[in-house]
Image (spheres, helix red, strand yellow):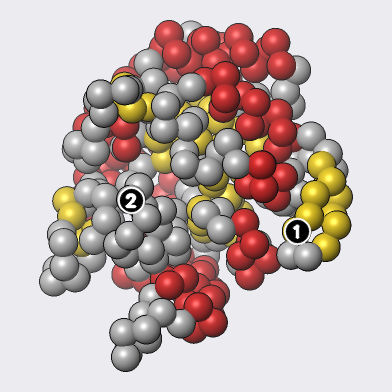
Amino acid sequence: TLEYMSRLGKVNDTVKDKLVIVPRIYTNKPRTKGVGYKGMFLQPDPEGTADIVRGIRSIRLLHLAAMNESGLTAADEMLYPENTPYVEDLLSYHAVGARSVEDQLHRQVASGIDAPVGMKNPMSGNILALVNSIYAAQSPQVFKYRNYQVSSDGNPYAHAILRGGVDGSGADVPNFHYETVMQLAELYKNSNLQNPAIIVDCNHSNSGKQFKQQIRIAQEVMQNRRFDGEFKKLVKGFMIESFLVEGSQKHDDVFGKSITDPCLGWADTERLLCDLAEQV
């Protein structure tokens, strides 16, 4: 991670006038079936037993080291809402995942965070449910949190992340295309939401986890931004899965290669960022 951050910091120096780069350092991993690698938060100790206190300390040390290495502050996923206070002073962006976005506590905690929160559309791809989640996160809330009654003012920077959906037969249904974005634009207008914004997740169900397709998807969205001023105003950026070595692996055998979702490699990532900067 620190090697990646060092390289990303150098690229940021060349494109920072055009792009805002927020590295995704996700220290928790949601699992569809509830088992498997769950990230640093539950990283086993040397004896193989999960040590949550050790995990929390490791997460903070990683985020601090990444900042020192690159000068960039990161995004993390709010998988477990009660853990947010352990990292919120270190993050510039929070993401609420597709499996969590309809959960009441995730929405309520998002309403009290003093940073942008991206709300992913649910696994079903339901856009109306996504808009409802954004509305809840932007609204003042009163709720029980960490054994206290707390209140929030609402988060005006909660916004949409389009990650594609999965239909009843398990097939991926992309939703980054022009027609879906403009449908969401209309829902934004009708809901009187603040600061309308969309981030396009180039991987997951938008690419069918065909990681190389992230390049094509980003370029297609950029073309639509040139075509339509309203589209351009609404679509603010991309979420891209990237690491040092392209693809993925089952075991941690190759340095800098993902052990979860397949990722773009470094050369493609650097080229894509520079291409995007030229088009802004």
* 3D distance between C-alphas at marks 1 and 2: 26 Å
Proximity of marks 1 and 2: CB atoms separated by less than 8 Å: no
Q: Quadrant of residue 128?
A: top right
Say which of 23 and 71 sits in front. Answer: 23
The residue at which mark 2 appears reads as 33
Say which of 132 and 89 sits in front. Answer: 132
Q: Secondary structure at mark 1?
A: strand
Q: Position of residue 250 (x, y in %)?
A: 16, 61
Q: Is residue 155 above or below residue 247?
A: above
Q: Position of residue 122 (x, y in %)?
A: 47, 32
Q: How many marks?
A: 2
Q: Position of residue 236 (x, y in %)?
A: 53, 30
> Which kind of residue does numbered mark 1 sit on?
Tyr
Residue at 31% x, 23% y is 168
Residue at 71% x, 16% y is 191
Residue at 83% x, 63% y is 148
Q: Quadrant of residue 156?
A: top right
Q: Quadrant of residue 90?
A: bottom right
Which comes before the other along the chain, label 1 or label 2? 2
Quadrant of the drawing holding the N terminus: bottom left
**Does residue 186 appear in this view?**
yes
Q: Secondary structure at mark 2?
A: loop
**Does residue 11 appear in this view?**
no
> Which kind of residue does numbered mark 2 sit on?
Lys
Residue at 39% x, 66% y is 39
The residue at which mark 1 appears reads as 145
With 84 as the anchor, is 232 left or right in this view? left
